[in-house]
Amino acid sequence: MGIDPGHNGGNFTNSAIINKIIWNGRADESCDTTGTATAGGYTEAQFNFSVAAYLRADLIAAGAHVVMTRDSNGGVGPCVTTRAQILNDAHANVAIDIHADGGPATGRGFTVLEPVADAANDKVIASSKAFGVDVRDAMLAYTTMPPSTYYGASGVVERNDLAGLNLTTVPKILVECGNMPNATDARMLTSPAFQQQVARAFTAAIVAFLTGRPIARG
């Protein structure tokens, strides 16, 4: 299984690295960004890594081999292209990019971002979309975070401008688990209990995707 906790805690300290221009499969973009944060200063990078750590533990307990694109929250990068390559090289059965959004403060909710075919990822578009449905259903079953009120439709949107999705050769989606500038979402995103719920939702989605069985309710 592949887990990509977006951004990194040290990205704030090295703009030269994260501002390096890379090719995302369709256009130029920066190597990475710092990510967003709540009004209280809790960073997206920390949220992403915390959920990833819980998810990794859950998957290992279930007998899975897990590959992470970073193993701490104190480093810089790696670039989004490198993250995609790590998971591709691992031949992950399925992969998930974990994020939280920096949308309008009045907006709430999670969004599943799905890839659009662009040659490199052609063979995994259908499987990625199927996994996206499982993730959406699991988020609704395991958490009280609603689908986004400001982005996508019913908690899902297609994106063709992200290296992690454009360059993937394994089934993969990206999840914005909530909106950090929103006060209600922020209280949830900073809660270890909610982070564990999200990890359990992702585990349930992965199991459902790999076995073809319905989402198991927690």
Image (tube, rainbow, N blue to C red):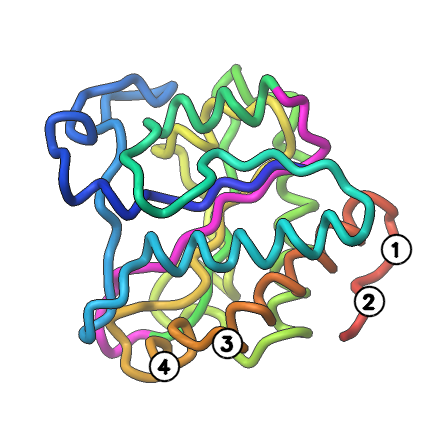
Secondary structure under the numbered disc 2 in the rendered image: loop
Dot 3 falls on a residue whose secondary structure is loop
Q: Residue at x 27, y 60 (%)?
A: 43
**Residue at the disc numbered 1:** 213
Query: For the point 47% across and 32% down, which residue is it?
Result: 165
Q: Which residue is mark 4?
A: 187
Pointer 3 residue? 145
**What mark, if any, has residue 216 been given in the picture?**
2
- Please, what is the three-letter code of the amino acid marked with disc 2? Ala
Few, some or many residues within 10 Å of mark 3 (<14, 14–19, 20+)? many
Upstream in the sequence, badge 1 or badge 3?
A: 3
Mark 4, Cα crowd under 10 Å, few <14 / some 14-19 / many 20+, is few
Residue 166 is one of the magenta-drawn residues = no
Q: CA distance from mark 4 to mark 2?
A: 26 Å
The N terminus is located in which quarter? top right
3D distance between C-alphas at marks 1 and 2? 8 Å
- Side of 192 where 178 appears, left or right: left
Q: Upstream in the sequence, badge 4 or badge 2?
A: 4
Q: Earlier in the sequence, mark 3 or mark 4?
A: 3
Instruction: Tell me: residue 117, above or below residue 1.
Output: above
Disc 1 marks a residue whose amino acid type is Arg
Residue 105 seen by the camera:
yes
Look at the numbered disc 1 and give the secondary structure of its residue. loop
Predominant SS along the magenta part: loop
Give the foreground label among 3 and 4: 4
- Report the residue at 54% width, 53% height from top: 53
Query: Start and end of the magenta stretch?
Result: 90-107
Amino acid at the residue labelled 4: Arg
Q: CA distance from mark 2 to mark 3?
A: 18 Å
Q: Secondary structure at mark 4?
A: helix
Q: In the image, is 187 to the left or to the right of 63?
A: left
